[in-house]
Amino acid sequence: MSRPGDRPATRPPEQALDRTLAAAVRRTRAAAGGLYVLDERRRVLCLVATGGLPAEYAEPWTRIALAAPDPVADAVREDRLVWVGGLEELARCYPRAAAAQPYRFCMAAAPVSGPGTCRGALLLLWPAGRSPRAGHRERARMMHAAHRISGLLRAAGEPPVIPEQPRLVQVHGLDTRAPQAALGFAERLPGGSLALDTEGRITFVTSSAARLLNHDAASLLGRLPWQALPWLDDPAYADKYRTALLSREPVFFHALRPPGTWLDFYLFPGPDGISVRVVETALADRPPTLMPIKPPSAGRPIGVSRLYQLMHLAAALTEAAGVRDVVDLVAAQILPSFGAQGLVLSTAEAGRLKITGHRGYPPEVIESLDGLPLDTVITPAGQVLASGVPSFFADPAEMARSYPKTPKLSDKQAWAFLPLIVSGRPVGCCIVSYERPHTFTADERAVLTSLAGLIAQAMDRARLYDATHQLAHDLQQALLPRTLPRINGLDVAARYLPASHGMDIGGDFYDVIPLDQHTTAAVIGDVQGHSSAAAALMGQVRTAVHAHATAGATPDQVLARTNRVLTDVEPDLLVSCLYAHLDLSAHQITLASAGHAPPLMRSPDGRTAPLTLDPGPLLGIHAGALYPPTTVPLPVNTLLALYTDGLVEVPGRETDDTTAGLADHLARTDVSDLDQLIDNLVHHSWPQGWHTDDIALLLLRTTGAPGRA
């Protein structure tokens, strides 16, 4: 969006950017392309120009949050070329994007970046049928085009103006000429013939086609069919054209020309456009399901682009877990999609509107709105929630006419107040606002109203999740040690990390047990599953280990006696456990394992490897199980890392390879700060931060003379 003080003369000429985009589409033999520029303030990638398909078909992709799981966003964030070889790969790697683009095609996103320039991306689409892999020459052409765009941005010194709607770039010029022989050939064929360019405009029409369409040929040329023929302005028909354009596969459909004539349309796509055959449907061939279509009672139908946009946003909302996730997702995905700048999400609690999240408002405004009664006249939110009917205000004057007592609290100029209702029960209110006056079109109102229902469902789930999350957190904290003991001669640090998805509770546990002035026990274990039952069993195991350890049992006896306790209660879950007895005066450690991963030991000289142990069976299998002990030296400045399998069981990788890599990383890492080291080790195994299982990690480092503090 341009701002006061902009100097248009210094901005990269739009014509130069458009020519570069068109050249990139032609030289890579792509079907379509788009140029994105990053809005640094909002952290959103904005589509500023598109070529090869109608601009309205790019609506689901015009605003992409930089943090979104999307090929374009990944290309910018990671500064690399992202290639997606087909719909299957898109659905696997980017399910949200696949929901809005359910067509067979390949795509590539190349980063547009450079020192001191506005970042962005070049997006290119190829139809079905091409190789799912990009060759070296193709990749080089894509990156060359991205570098040329980067050079234009760098030369200008300022980012380009971000338009309200992307510019439509003509990749191929409009050519309505037809040689006389070809025209005669087409006229003699039965039915009618049309030609569309890659932007969907009619470039050729026979007289028989004009007669079948009941329209003058001259008024059709250069126009989009669904604009020239209102009865074709329907999402079902638009989707057929979109399929032919993006997938480059023949498409057939029936359409009703009012008042009662059915026509068959055959679309044959090619690199430079689509050939269309139109014939009247034979009465005998009409399927029984073809009934006259009644026009909608109010307004025009929602466009197919908006429908796919709705699917895309709905898919994103299904990934939200807690209330904060919902707020972040609505702010990152929904606001950019509708060009909005402000958001307030509130819930109805005890007769008041409690704000649960917001974007684009100063704190003092939110403070004045938080906790208002539902019947307040300060904002329409309460009445909207009570009536269940959304309200739209295109400018402050319209707001003042409807709600004259509403004070001016912010600089926003247009608003959509959306009630959040679940099964007739009010959940809250969503306010979407704009910094400039904004006229809400019929399909915007329809999509926003539909989204309100999805947001309401997501908010209701999120509040339940947060309540469960807090309960699980409290239970987990009650079962794990509140603090670790201070022991002379030993530095200790520990961390429990729940799985990134699912219930925030599990059976991983750890403990450090001072036994006397010279000896200390350490234990780590993992109860099968993620449930309250797993947590309860974890509490039983930890208590049993602690009792037997403080009673003076040896490591093998601690595990054997704990195992007998578990077999007596016949649990449905199994437990792995590692028990270590540290003699700090003798500088040695004795360990026993019940099917648990061996610890990593880093020697004073930095050499690191897993200890070799002879493990016994998991706890709870049979009462007579034995757990042979292993004793090894424990010099001063030795580091032990005890962990559960969530740290090293990474999908797609062998556990042995992950463990070896973790040991190598530990050998080369600064170990002076144990808490920082825990973060470092977890990040090494899970650099994206989304670990699939619980992780417990306990670090022990010997420092000198033993003795309890």
Image: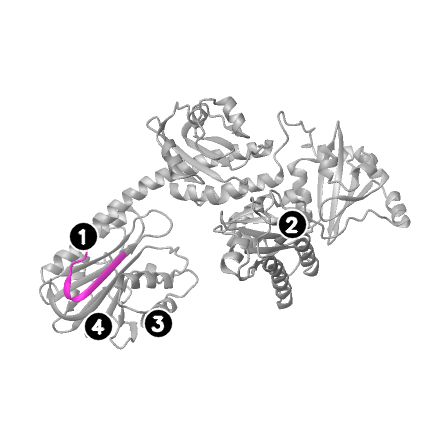
Disc nearer the start of the sequence (4/1): 1
**Where residue 304 appears, x then y in whole percent?**
62, 39
Q: In the rendered image of this protein, does residue 233 appear above or below residue 34?
A: above
Task: Give how far apart the Cα atoms at labels 4 and 3 are.
Answer: 18 Å
Q: What span is in magenta?
A: 482-495
Question: Left or right: 538 with respect to 403?
Answer: left
Q: In the rendered image of this protein, does residue 585 appear above or below residue 596?
A: below
Disc nearer the start of the sequence (1/2): 2
Three-letter amino acid code of the residue under disc 3: Asp
Residue highlighted by disc 2: 50
Tag shown at residue 637: 4
Residue highlighted by disc 1: 568
Residue in the foreground of this view, choosing between 513 and 530: 513
Three-letter amino acid code of the residue under disc 1: Asp
Q: Residues within 10 Å of mark 1 (few under 14, many from 20)?
A: few
Give me the residue at 79% from left, 38% from top: 220
Give me the residue at 88% from left, 46% from top: 183
